[in-house]
């Protein structure tokens, strides 16, 4: 079978890897038999971008595994940048990133750190790269997070269903 390339959110092409989808579904608490079913269906009807793959997985989960679907939809793994301009209780992010997270302006964003969730007040800024979070540099160092690490992020309304998705990667 020929490798299939898909477009990522940032416009880069990447070879589709069903293991990444399976890992993401497993983190959300999806049952193994459901993971196999979703991976199979996506292989049959795959779009040409990661967003279409995610949408398909979310549709399947909404029908067959609603609670796991909420966890899967809620969390996004987002790279972290540091800045001394950010207050210790704030996360700065691009408006499009907030839209992906379905986050309201000035809403609370929960970040998964060492198997616990920490709340941050969101501040929108067009100066932050899309699909990145900017946190206080001193806080990042004290929390032991490497710049560029990908951490789970979810809006406050989703935190109840986020427990299995909350971890540092």
Image: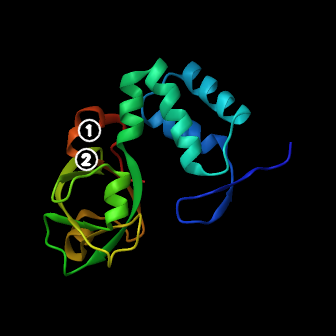
In the rendered image, the quadrant that contains the C terminus is: bottom left
Nearest the camera: 49 or 88?
49
- Left or right: residue 56 versus residue 165 is right
Image spot of residue 19 (x, y percent): 63, 41
Q: Residues within 10 Å of mark 2 (few under 14, many from 20)?
A: many
Q: Are marks 1 and 2 in contact (CB under 8 Å)?
A: yes
Q: Quadrant of residue 22?
A: top right
- Left or right: residue 164 versus residue 13 is left
Q: Is residue 5 above or below residue 161?
A: below
Q: Is residue 84 above or below residue 105?
A: below
Label 1, on which residue? Answer: 158
Q: What secondary structure is marked by label 2?
A: strand
In the rendered image, the quadrant that contains the N terminus is: top right
Identify the residue shown where x is 41% and y is 63%: 131
Count of numbered labels shown in the rendering: 2
Q: Quadrant of residue 33?
A: top right
Nearest the camera: 124 or 3?
124
Could you say which disc has been placed on residue 155 in the image? 2
Image spot of residue 120 (x, y percent): 17, 57
- Left or right: residue 96 versus residue 23 is left
For the residues labelled 1 and 2, the Cα–Cα distance comes to 6 Å
Q: Is residue 97 above or below residue 137?
A: above
Nearest the camera: 117 or 21?
21
Identify the residue shown where x is 29% and y is 44%: 115
Could you say which disc has been placed on residue 115 in the image? none
Image spot of residue 160 (x, y percent): 23, 33
Q: Residues within 10 Å of mark 1 (few under 14, many from 20)?
A: some
Image spot of residue 23 (x, y percent): 54, 39
């Amino acid at each position: 079978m020929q490798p299939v390339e898909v477009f990522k959110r940032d416009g880069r092409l990447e070879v589709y890897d069903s293991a990444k989808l399976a890992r993401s579904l497993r983190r959300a608490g999806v049952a193994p038999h459901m993971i196999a079913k979703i991976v199979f269906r996506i292989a049959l009807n795959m779009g040409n971008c990661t967003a279409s793959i995610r949408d398909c997985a979310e549709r399947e989960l909404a029908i067959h595994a609603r609670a796991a679907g909420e966890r899967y939809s809620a969390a996004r793994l987002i790279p972290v940048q540091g800045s001394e301009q950010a207050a210790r209780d704030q996360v700065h992010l691009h408006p499009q990133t907030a839209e992906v997270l379905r986050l309201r302006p000035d809403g609370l964003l929960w970040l998964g750190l060492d198997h616990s969730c920490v709340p941050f007040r969101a501040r929108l800024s067009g100066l932050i790269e899309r699909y990145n979070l900017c946190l206080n540099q001193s806080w990042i160092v004290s929390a032991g997070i490497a710049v560029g690490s990908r951490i789970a992020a979810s809006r406050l309304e989703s935190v109840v269903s986020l427990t299995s998705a909350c971890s540092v990667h």
